Image (cartoon, grey):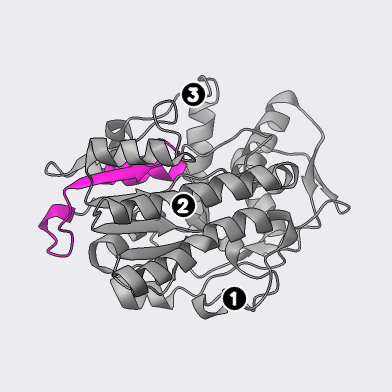
Amino acid sequence: MSNLTQNEGFPYRRVVVTGGGGFLGRFVVARLRSEPHLEVFVPRKQEYNLVEAADIMRLYEHTTPDLVIHLAAVVGGIGANQKNPGKFFYENLMMGVQLIEQARLHDVRKFVAIGTVCAYPKFTPTPFREDDLWKGYPEETNAPYGLAKKMMLVQAQSYRQQYGFNTIFLLPANLYGPGDNFDPNSSHVIPALIRKCVEARDEGQPFIEVWGTGNASREFLYVDDCAAGILKATAVYNDSDPVNLGNGREVPIRALVEMIVRLTNFRGEIRWLSDKPDGQPHRQLDVSRAQEKFDFQAQTTLEEGLRSTVGWYEAHRSKPATQTESAEELQGLLGA
């Protein structure tokens, strides 16, 4: 891991990471906590409900951060988005709006807002360029979530203009990796497929069923690559323009499924449920701005990342669902 505290562009010492106990958050926190001079605070929902302004005010008064990295989100796959559009819109909107407003009022020096690729219009030409964010409506199945997150960009730009408040807005590609959510009711495509294939293999099932046609394509970013990109941007990027975080390559879902089938050693048939939605037809990000502004390039290939994720799931699937790695365990996983 890079030594953040030796970087002149990282003059922060007290950091709040919302969602720091979540999938991406644990990797960001592990990197931050490898630096001895940083104080890192991760608010827990049972202590601070970030949908409520009073809890946010109490959080900032207790921790007095000079930097906030907002990773917390209410999120899920296509099915979860279809079942909870109102909840996903309201809770994500209220968290973002109030965290930024209270950060401004509490003299936080920098706020790092993490958006979502779901904010892009449904028919955005690939690769997605940041300047295309407002050229249409998002894909319907996850539009409420995507729009709620995109409001942080509006707030960031307007607050910079009026108050000089330093907020940056980053748009990661679809994430995957060790420690992902493998709950079939709320997981995204990669962990859902890994679990489906492993269980079918172990139970000797002759086939698996997969939503859609397999023709849609996605770009996937390994979770620790994303954590590295966020901290690079945090250190040196101070502008109101949104920035994509990705690897700049997309893969058809059909090819992704075939790769996961191979890596999990499932020998059965793949049956496509073509009456189920594919979601957005294409997602691939233009990553040139991230490289230009803060020298970010993803390092992990899809094959490497999937192999690591399958291995993690195989090793951890018998553990309680609440178990997560500590920062020290993650540093070991990452070869720190």
Q: Position of residue 298 (x, y in %)?
A: 40, 63
| Quarter of the figure with residue 47 | top left
| Residue at which label 2 appears | 96
Mark nearer the N terminus (2 vs 3): 2
Which region shows up in magenta?
4-31
| Dot label at residue 117 | none
Q: Residue at x 49, y 23 (%)?
A: 322
Q: Position of residue 271 (x, y in %)?
A: 83, 46
**CA gap, disc 2 to disc 3?**
25 Å
Amino acid type at circle 3 is: Thr
Mark in front: 3 vs 1: 1
Q: Residue at x 48, y 47 (%)?
A: 95
Amino acid type at circle 1 is: Trp
Q: Residue at x 34, y 44 (%)?
A: 17
Is residue 313 positioned above or below 24 on the image? above
Q: Secondary structure at mark 3?
A: loop
Amino acid type at circle 2 is: Gly
Instruction: Please indicate whether residue 144 sits to the left or right of residue 12 in the image.
Output: right
Nearer to the camera, 144 or 319: 144
Q: Residues within 10 Å of mark 2 (few under 14, many from 20)?
A: many
Q: Secondary structure at mark 1?
A: loop
| Dot label at residue 134 | 1
Report if residue 7 lies within the magenta region: yes
Mark nearer the N terminus (3 vs 1): 1
| Residue at which label 3 appears | 322
